[in-house]
Amino acid sequence: MTDDARVTAAIESSRLFAWLDRIVAWMWSTAAASRSGAKIASLVTWWRLLPTELFRLGLGILILTAAAVHSVLMLTLGQRESWLWPLIPAIAAAAGATLLLFSRSPARE
């Protein structure tokens, strides 16, 4: 994918983009100055510095839990509009299982 300089210049010169850019900058500066923002930043840093195996394991467990909770809520609340409702949790569960499968480091001889 290539960036066209004219398209980029047109987007960056728009008032909407400038307004959104100011809002995002304000949100980042506010989050950086708050205690809760600092705590979240430290947790994100801790999460990103985990070894790859632990990162994949944690993410796989998180995704599988989300798929299970979604499925249980859909089954108990009974708000299923069609037979396609299990599609999203099934895809998420497959992704979570794949992450769990690849969370182990290869066998070393």
Image (cartoon, grey):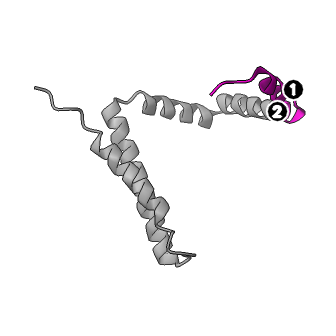
Query: Is 27 left, or right, of 52 in this rendering?
Result: right
Q: Name the element at disc 1.
A: loop
Mark 1 residue type: Ser
Q: Is residue 5 above or below residue 55?
A: above
Q: Residue furthest left?
A: 109
Q: Residue at coordinates 82% horizontally, 33% vertically from top-left?
A: 17
Labelled disc at residue 17: 2
Mark 1: give few (<14), some (14-19) or many (20+) Cα within 10 Å: few
Where does the magenta region start and end?
A: 1-19
Query: Within the image, what quadrant is residue 81 found in?
Result: bottom right
- Report if the CB atoms under discs 1 and 2 are less than 8 Å apart: yes
Q: What residue sits 44% from the left and 56% below the top?
A: 91
Answer left or right for 88 relative to 37: left
Q: Is residue 63 above or below residue 8?
A: below
Q: Is residue 46 left or right of residue 2?
A: left
| x then y, percent, for residue 102 | 29, 40
Residue placed under numbered mark 1 in the picture:
13
Above or below 106: residue 69: below
Q: Position of residue 98 (x, y in %)?
A: 33, 46
Query: Where, quadrant-wise, is the N terminus in this rendering?
Result: top right
Which residue, as the protein is rendered here, is positioned at the far top?
5
User: How far across and how far down the image is residue 93, in percent?
Assistant: 39, 56
Q: Secondary structure at mark 2?
A: helix
